[in-house]
Amino acid sequence: MPGSKYEEYGRPKPPADPNAEYMTMQETADVLKCSVKTVTRLLDELGLKSKVGRWVVTDSATRRALYEHRVQGPKRVHRPARRTRKPSAPTPIKSAA
């Protein structure tokens, strides 16, 4: 059974100072209004570094880059709507003559 600290790790927590230079992953997730998993995915996707020590923390420049990426959002691919198939007319049965 996982402990309470393990269960709390994935939940965003409000930071004591929203303008702090360094924040934990949970605080960053709360500021960006997303999950910790999303912050981790975005860090990997953008190739940004986060300091690894006892805690994984992000600095203000990294948070700004994550925010800019989230505001732009993923590029959407325009796909035309699917056309419905028209029922075909029944084919006449040919008799062997």
Image (cartoon, rainbow, N blue to C red):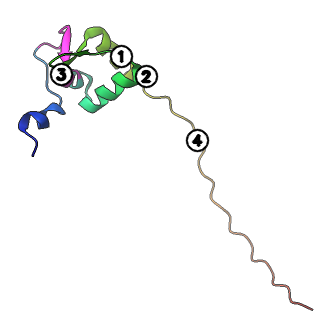
Please give the residue where the numbered disc 3 appears in the rendered image: 27
Residue 71 located within the stretch drawn in magenta: no
Tell me the amino acid under the disc marked 4.
Answer: Arg
Marks 4 and 2, how far apart in space?
20 Å
Judged from the image, the secondary structure of the residue bearing numbered disc 4 is loop
* Residue 55, position as x, y percentages in the image: 16, 20
Q: Earlier in the sequence, mark 2 or mark 1?
A: 1
Tell me the amino acid under the disc marked 1.
Answer: Leu
Asked if labels 3 and 2 touch by Cβ distance under 8 angstroms, the answer is no
Asked if labels 1 and 2 touch by Cβ distance under 8 angstroms, the answer is no
Tell me the amino acid under the disc marked 3.
Answer: Glu
- Quarter of the image with the C terminus is bottom right
Marks 4 and 3, how far apart in space?
37 Å
Please give the residue where the numbered disc 1 appears in the rendered image: 48
Q: Earlier in the sequence, mark 2 or mark 3?
A: 3
Report the side of 46 relative to 87 (left or right).
Answer: left
Marks 2 and 1, how far apart in space?
17 Å
Q: Earlier in the sequence, mark 4 or mark 2?
A: 2
Marks 4 and 1, how far apart in space?
31 Å
Q: Residue at x 59, y 47 (%)?
A: 81
Q: Residue furthest bottom?
A: 97
